[in-house]
Structures are given as C-alpha cells and as structure tokens.
Image: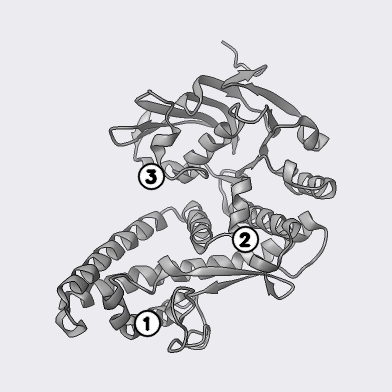
Amino acid sequence: MLVRLLSLTDFRNYRQADVLLEPGANLFVGSNGQGKTNLVEALGYLSTLGSHRVSTDAALIRMDAPSAIIRARLEHEDRQLLVEVELNRGAANRAQVNRSAVRTRELPRYFSSVLFAPEDLALVRGDPGGRRRFLDQLLVLRTPRLAGVLADYDRVLRQRNSLLKSARARGLKADQLGTLDIWDERLVSLGAEIIVARARLVGELTPEVQRGYEAVAGADHGPSLRPALSILGADPDEEQDSAPTPGEALPDATDGADVARAFTVALERLRRRELDRGVTLAGPHRDDVVFTLNGLPAKGYASHGESWSFALALKLASAELLRRESTTGDPVLMLDDVFAELDEARRARLANAVGGYGQVLITAAVYGDVPEALRAHTVHIEAGRIVGSEPDA
C-alpha cells in the first residue's frame, strides 16, 4: 500500500495543503511547530479513526473552521483508491471511498499504517490505559469487526456502572439487584472475547518484539510480554489478599471458556466491593500487559535507551504482523520525530529495520538527524505550507 497524494483542508494549521509522496522513504523537515506532525497525524486518523495526540476530533479542525477534510489517494499494484473523511464540529463525521459514501468506521479497512511518535514512550513508562489502547487499535486493524465488540463492551460497562452507582445511592444490597445478573452475562460474554483476543495478540507479538528489539538495540535483553488480568486480581487499584494468584485459576488466557468462568467468579467475588464503590472492578477495561527486560519490569527498571528500543520494537512488531496478513501490501510506516531521541547507532539500526517497507514517512526538525538512506524524497514544511513538493496542476 502506498500513499500517492495527501490533501488537507482546514486540518490543524493547514488551510489547504497537497503533498505528493513517493515509494520508499519520504522525509518531512521543518522547525518545531510548522506542521510536520500534522501530516502523519492525518494519515494515522484514516487507519485508526483517532489522533495519537488528542482525544477529540474537534482539536483537529483549524480554528474558526466548521470542518476539516483529510483526503488520500492510495495505490496498490494497479488499483487506486481515493479515501476521504470530513471531520465536523457540529455534526457526525462523513467518509467516502472513490466518491461513494461509506460508514466512517469502515475506513481502516482501506488503509493500514503504523505510527511511532515520542508519545509512544508511554507504552513502556505510562499507565495501563495506553497499553490497552495499543493492543485494541492493533486488534481492530487486523480484525475490523472487533471495533463493534469493543464498542458494545464499553456500552454495557457504562450501563452496569450506572446501575451500581444507583444501587449505592439507594443503599441496595447485592440480593436486591436482579437486573445486575443480566448485565453480568453480557459483560462476561463481550469481555471474555476481548481478553482472549488480546492474549492471543500478545502471544503473536512476543517473538516479533524480540526480533525488533534486537534489531534496534543491537543486543538481546530478553524482552517479553505477559497479560495481567484483573479477573485474576492483577489490578493495582485493588487489594490482593483475597484474589487468586495471577495465572493460578486461568492456565490459558486464550481459552474462551476458561476466561468466561474466571470472569464470572471474579464478578461474584467482587460484588460487595463494587456496590460500595459504584464501579465495575474487573474486566478488560482494567487489564494491563507487563513488559519485561532481563526478567525485570521494563517500567521502572529499563533505561531511557532501553525504553525507547522497547517502544520501537512494539511498533515494528505491529507492522510485521500487519504485513504478514495483508492483501494490500505493507502498512505505511510513520516515524514522527523519532530520530532526535536516538543515538547514532540506534538511528542506523532503525533505518535498516524499516528499509524493507514499501513506504516510510519520517518527520524531523533537523535534517542531519535522519540517516542518509531515509532522505530519498525530502519535503520542507514552513508554517502550514508544503515547500518544494507541489502536485502537478
């Protein structure tokens, strides 16, 4: 898959911009705040329906504009697609493929990308929520129907939490809440599917992360990934005295029946505390995945360079899984201001690791930070303007 043309209207600081892209490496260079990241953010939106920097679409629309448009001309072999999305302040977003309307949530079916940005260091050092989002976005890219499962789970979770809050306010006891059992069944059904999908994904990612880490770091520090499931008591917000030892009651997190049984038992065990707090205390919304290096948790023990290498390895592993399954070629790799954070040796190794992909987009404030092999097509950015890469009229 290649992006041949990216066109933006009223997106971020771009009133109107068109940039032609080439196969292989494309480098966007400009001082900080000129709009380099906005270009890769726009393409990232087409494959994830979200931004890696902000949580609301409104922040992506240029100030005082009612809407923004992202348009990309995609190419795979002899087939071309024109993919468009309109982000609206006061109405639902709209999408088109080859000028025909489609549901916005269907856009990731047509374009696959993997973005690495400085914010991704939080995958290693940050809160569990970021790691859950990382897994879920990759799940949806690989299996788009899981977007519906995740949305349904969130809806059921909100309903269940609302019921728990209402029960707490009214002073009701567990045996006075017959409707809670109905929500429990739905929560377990949807949640077990998510837990199993994540666990299987972690299993597939692990060997690719190991290869990616060694490719970037130049050393084998034994990187590994392990699910930490709240249905087994692996919740940092909860006391662990009455919870089973993680792994003890669930030998196989990829077995749906085992997961559903453990989830049901956890809800029964936590029922009183959930009524006291008015919130659901177990489920995929409270899970984590533990990253380790040399047998120790990467969070808290890994050095800055090791953390960067691990985060890069996670994204390289994601790209490899998508590449392996794709019928439309490689995902587009996007490296946003990454090379400034790496030493010279890691820069060279990363350039070598991504060199085999069909298209790589790089942003940098300093031209010299990027290895020569990734400078084949350079576009300069100045204050929301594309310099030297205008498309033919």
Neighbours of disc 1 within 10 Å: few (<14), some (14-19), many (20+): many
Please name the residue shown 47% across and 43% down the image. Answer: 54
In the image, residue 229 lies at what x, y percent?
A: 48, 75
The Cα atoms of the two marked residues, 1 and 3, are separated by 33 Å
- The tag on residue 105 is 3
In the image, residue 379 lies at what x, y percent?
A: 68, 24
Please name the residue shown 43% across and 82% down the image. Answer: 258
Lower position in the chain sequence, tag 1 or tag 3? 3
Neighbours of disc 2 within 10 Å: few (<14), some (14-19), many (20+): many
Give amino acid for label 1: Ala
Q: Mark 1 points at which residue?
A: 266
In the image, residue 156 lies at what x, y percent?
A: 28, 64
Lower position in the chain sequence, tag 3 or tag 2? 3
On-image quarter of the N terminus = top right
- The tag on residue 124 is 2
Q: What element carries label 3?
A: helix
